[in-house]
Image: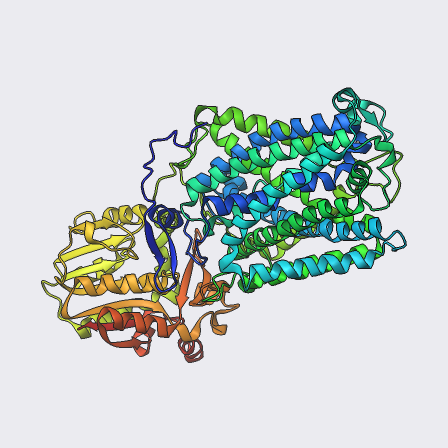
Amino acid sequence: MSSNNKSVPQHGAEEVEMDEGKDMVGTAKDAQEMDRLGREQQLNRNFRFISILGFSSTAMSTWEIVLSSTIFGLLNGGLAGLVWGFFLVWMGYCFVFASLAEMASMAPTSGGQYHWVSEFSPKSTQRFLSYAVGWISVLGWQTGLASIAYIPGTLIQGLIVLNNPSYVFERWHGTLLVIAIVAFAVLFNTFLAKRLPMIEGIVLILHLLGFFGVLIPLWVLSPRNSAEMVFTQFQNLGGWPTQGLSFMVGLLTSVYGLLGADSAVHMSEEIRDASIVLPKATMWSIVVNGAFGWIMIITFAFIAGNPLYIVDSDTGYPFISAFYNATGSKVGTSVMVAIIITNTVSSVISSLATVSRQLWSFARDRGVPCSSFLAHVKDGWNIPLNAVLVTFCCTALLSLINIGSTAAFNAVASMGTNALLTTYIISIGCVVIRRLRGQPLPERRWSLGRAGLYVNLFALAFLLTIWIFLFFPVQTPVTLSTMNWNVLINGGVMILAFTYYILYGKDMYSGPVALPPPNMSSAPPKGQMYDSVAGDYDIIWSVPAVKILFPLLDTNLRRLGPWNGASVLDLACGTGIGLREMQKLGATKLVGVDISDEMLGMAKQTSPEAGFELHHADCSQPLDHLGLEKGSFDLVIAMWLLNYPADRAQMAAMWQNVATYLKPKAKFVGIIQNQDTVNPTSMQGKWEEYGARETGLQPLPSGDGVRMHIEFNTQPKVEFDTFVLKKEILEEEGKKAGLVDLQYVRPGEEVKREVEGKDAAWWKELLEEYPNQLIIATRE
């Protein structure tokens, strides 16, 4: 495997300001990738290679977790089953981690699997499959966090039992400890969030030193089993008909201990130079954690004694009894277990960060209820605080199940393993389909090269095999308490998610990638969206709600003229409607700029003899490369341009382009949404009469305004998303750019001639809350 199999430049590691005024520093490559992914930088990029390696390694905490879950392997496989089962799972996971690392280099986003599925899956299944994977990932990580926090909580109880045999192992004690541990993790993920990368680097050192702090005393002080017993004697204490079947069921110990390949992925937008640092850290984490885990399992197998004597340990954990039997010292055992408790608490801290970022990212794409609340990032904190607090509440509520029944809690908590493996299977499967079809993948700085398809296929084969056995109960005969309820619980949650999708989600969720670009070029996502509607775009001007803008625009342009021989620049010119209007009014130099190639193609097709000068560019970026003379235009027009900025920075950039190309004292005329009548009640339920409606209104995560979906009652139906930023943002950024005398012009009597047969009541209702208006300004 190579970290640079494609000829992608490795420069771009220099620091750049990614969001003006918010102290968010990343590399030029980070900024480029966020732009390609259509994302706004909202979180601080504080993580580097060592800190994210520490984060990933402690989130997995393999040698600690695998010791805590040895009960499954001891029952099914015995000591030899633990040793060889871990090795096989480790090797299989290497292929899984490599596959995920390559996808992370292609699209380093906090969304992880559901974003990858949206980008790589077949078009016909793209939206629903991405939505389903998003929900499964939320399910996996939310229940997984409860499972992880349960380990140090009950380890503390086990340690108390070891030192005080009279202690009664109460379930509610464990629940309170779980809640306390997660609350402690919240502290690190909120007030200490800016120091989290430094803390993760320190914890990595503790993770490594703790390993030797446990390993060395065990080898020095313990009597040992024979090598024959450790490497060749398998056991079937689960009552399965064959040893092979028992061995496969017992792999849960190793699968659980190596779970979390995507933990660092969900921190992508907080990693500096993420597309190369993240995959490298991912691969190092499986190498280091896997090696430490296997060494610790072999050590445990040598010092465990007879498994029959420790599987029913009063402490609840066989390894605690094994440590005590091996050392003969409660103090020594307590110190070693305390090291493991400390490291697993660190795992909870890292996992809480991962879980909250995954939830925040999915909410950002409107995949869950209360999306705007969960996706909010408070300025100054630069963390998804609401998602952190909701995650804490979910874990606390899940831990309450333990008070009623530990078996029920384990059934719910164990869903995390199945759910996360499911997301890996679907994500890798989508990439396999693209590779088999010969479809190109995005450029990546860490590539599997020609081995990519074979690595992906082996990872899929491994995951599918493991996934099946994770639904098996631990032992037979099966009772209500020993039944593995994962099938029922996973199925029930997915039915609820599917129901929500049918009722609400399909109207709210479009996926992070609207359409998979055919050649994965660097064309902006907005351009791709408008490419898809270009052929039918002009018909929206035939519906009453839009049609009345013609006389409004014509009346005011004539008032501001004359325009004979004028030079006009149309930003976001679309299919050239504004340019054609200005040509009728006598303008002779007509220049249009638009982000959509298809829109520009329609402009040429509609007006082949007009002599328009058309350019393909994003009007929210500087236009210097187009070679237009600055300060040379008599008029700049913009049909809807100012409805497309998703935040203040993009609004500022658009106003700057307007000011840059206008002559002094020249005019700007645009059409915008009326910020005072967003989603007007007068248009609701009058689809047939007005011909347009606004749906899916959602506050932007930045707090700068709202995003909504607009549909037009045309054949075929035209629909797309748009943004409406706050009026004060529009005005402030316009003035900063040098535009003065901003005024809004709403439709009046002049528009009534455009739509016939409507009475006074119809016009009164429409015009009182009409959602569009002109904006006119003058260049200083």
Please identify the quarter of the rendering in which residue 557 is found.
bottom left
Query: Where is residue 110 drawn, in percent x and y?
Result: 50, 49
Please identify the quarter of the rendering in which residue 416 is found.
top right
Residue positioned 83% across, 23% down in the render: 242
Quadrant where the C terminus sits is: bottom left
Q: Observer-nearest residue: 26 or 765?
A: 26
Query: Where is residue 249 drawn, in percent x and y?
Result: 76, 31
Q: Is residue 26 left or right of residue 50?
A: left
Up/down of 688 relative to 272, above or below: below
Q: Is residue 668 left or right of residue 168?
A: left
Q: Observer-nearest residue: 767 or 73?
A: 73
Any part of residue 336 in sight: yes
Residue positioned 72% across, 39% down in the render: 67
Q: Observer-nearest residue: 504 or 223?
A: 223
Query: Where is residue 139 drawn, in percent x and y?
Result: 65, 49
Residue positioned 81% across, 23% down in the render: 243
Farthest residue, direction left: 565
Query: Where is residue 443 drawn, in percent x and y?
Result: 39, 36
Any part of residue 127 in sight: no
Up/down of 550 relative to 292, above or below: below
Residue positioned 31% across, 61% down in the render: 641
Q: Is residue 181 left or right of residue 556?
A: right
